Image (spheres, grey):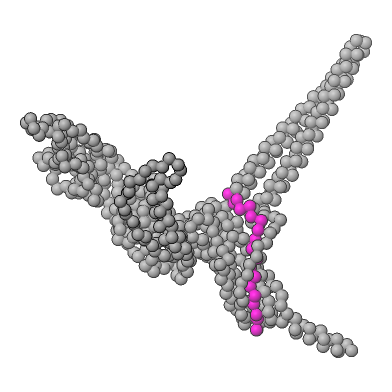
Amino acid sequence: MRALTLTSALFLLTIMPAMADDIPVDSKLKSVTIYSGASPQGYGAPATLTRTGYIQVPRGKHTLVFNDMPAGLMTDTLKTSAQGTAQAVLGAVSTKIVNNVALVSAREQELDEQKKALEQSKKLVNAEIAALGKKQDFLDSINKQAAVKINEQVSDFNLNTTQWIEAANTIHESNAQILKDTLEKQAQILDIDAQIAKINQDMQMLRTGQKQTREVRLPIEVAKPGYLTVSIDYQLNGISWNPIYDARLETASGELEIMQYGAVRQQTGEDWTDISLTLSTAQPSRGATAPELSTMWVDIMQAYTKRSLGGASFNDMARSSIQMEMAAPMAAEADAEIMEAVPVMATINNNGFNAEFEIPGAVSIPADGTETKVLIAPFQADVKIERHIKPQISNSAFLIANATIKGEKPLLAGPVSLFRDGSYIGKTNIPMLNPGKDYDLSFGIDDRIDVAFKTLKDESSEGGVLIGKTNKIDRETITEIQSLRDEAIEVAIFQTLPVSKNEDITVKILDEATTKDYEQDVNNIKGLTVWRYTLAPKEEKDVKLGWSVAWPKDQNITGLQ
């Protein structure tokens, strides 16, 4: 009989692994890919997150359960995979929302518990202050009774001075101690209030207030037991990155270093600890499908009689007609813009459309929305250093590094911190720059270049006889430049000329009053004129400009400065 019982037990142990059960998976966030164009408020492209968990699985049909997943994850982006020594087939994933009594975010829970503890401490301190108040009331009542006794003894000529003085001292000491204790307790209240205010600020930065999680269930059929590393990918909002740069110029060598960083923020409610981070320049939020153009109908406006009784105006009807014609293609365009995540395949990958940067090492990002700065890579650039002088608006010479981007990666738009010879100069912003595109970075004023701008002539006159009389202005200026430097430098002097917008207005450069070898309409800007020189050490240079503007006498002009 005992042998039969043992055999039955062994049989049950053999078949138990084949029975279906729920297997909880303790998953950890391993990697995140963030796309450009997203914002921490959740607008733009969501980020792709990957969690992994290590489990032992017995033979049979089971369900892997991922608890405490973000409630806001996009369920249609869920993707699962597994690898290990077990032989298993994964089924279709399902999810459900789980309502919780407490806050979901671990950091919010911690802050909430700290706040509750402080509020309880505040209540206790207030109770102690109230007790001290009662004690003070008791002493005050003794004081009143003592005053009555003293008056009675004085009237009876039976006053024991020594006894009453000792009693008065005792009451005084007790009052002083009560006041001291009360002040200490009030100081404790102020300190507690400050701590609570700080916690409220921290909670406001987290501001998830989330009490829901999502449970993800993954059916699995195991043919051979063993271990599995299960991965689950999903997309989530509340995550962003934007490029920021340091530009460091060494004036002695003329070298410019542009270092790119990623400013990462996330407000998912979960602190990221030691994850693999990839920053992508892809912008799924811009859409993948080209917009459709609709017909632009143009017609003759027909005369109409204004009605006295209601009805829409012709403009209203025309506007409605146009809106109806445009509505269908706009709706089609909206339906067509489907966001697709771009997988990251390499540490730095440029496929001709976008680049992905895999940040080296483990990265930790707090969930409170604060900026975390991660290093991406340096950018190489060909550099030409000049001093730009714009005497019409400033008597300063600005140190300019004209940088031409090298390599295959674009330089994304973003803020740049400027450093000249190790000293911080200020900040600027750059637009998106593709390889081969140049851009001027200004590194402040060169105080060793003296500039003086003088007006030599500014005269108005009239011309013509009877018919065809004109007004005329002649203006001549000189820019005096002196280099105080011990090395040769490149300078560029920029000035603007008047530009006519009317055929009756004539603008001429006065050759005899203008320094030669200038370039006009620089950078496709009408009227912008530049002179470029190489100044030897301590060299002086004068640049003259003369021009005239003529227009009909019976007309007035605007825009002349």
Measuring from the top left, give residue 294's x and y in whole percent: 37, 60
Indicate the quadrant where residue 94 lies.
bottom right
Out of 395 and 525, give the one closest to the viewer.
Answer: 525
* Residue at 18% across, 36% down: 477
Measuring from the top left, give residue 309's x and y in whole percent: 45, 42
Out of 96 and 450, give the one closest to the viewer.
Answer: 96
Residue 538 in view = no
Residue 452 falls inside the magenta stretch: no
- Magenta segment range? 205-224
Indicate the quadrant where residue 472 lies.
top left
Q: Is residue 12 above or below residue 421?
A: below
Task: Locate residue 555 relative to residue 6 in the image: left or right.
Answer: left
* Residue at 58% across, 57% down: 268
Dominant secondary structure, magenta:
strand
- Tell how many labels: 0
* Residue at 68% across, 70% down: 24
Q: Is residue 165 above or below residue 155?
A: below
Task: Quarter of the image for the C terminus: give it.
Answer: top left
Task: Locate residue 281 relative to residue 25 in the image: left or right.
Answer: left
Measuring from the top left, give residue 64's x and y in whole percent: 66, 72
Indicate the quadrant where residue 163 lies.
top right
Out of 490 and 474, give the one closest to the viewer.
Answer: 474
* Residue at 47% across, 63% down: 335
Residue 180 in view = yes
Measuring from the top left, give residue 278's x and y in whole percent: 48, 64
Task: Quarter of the image for the N terminus: give it.
Answer: bottom right
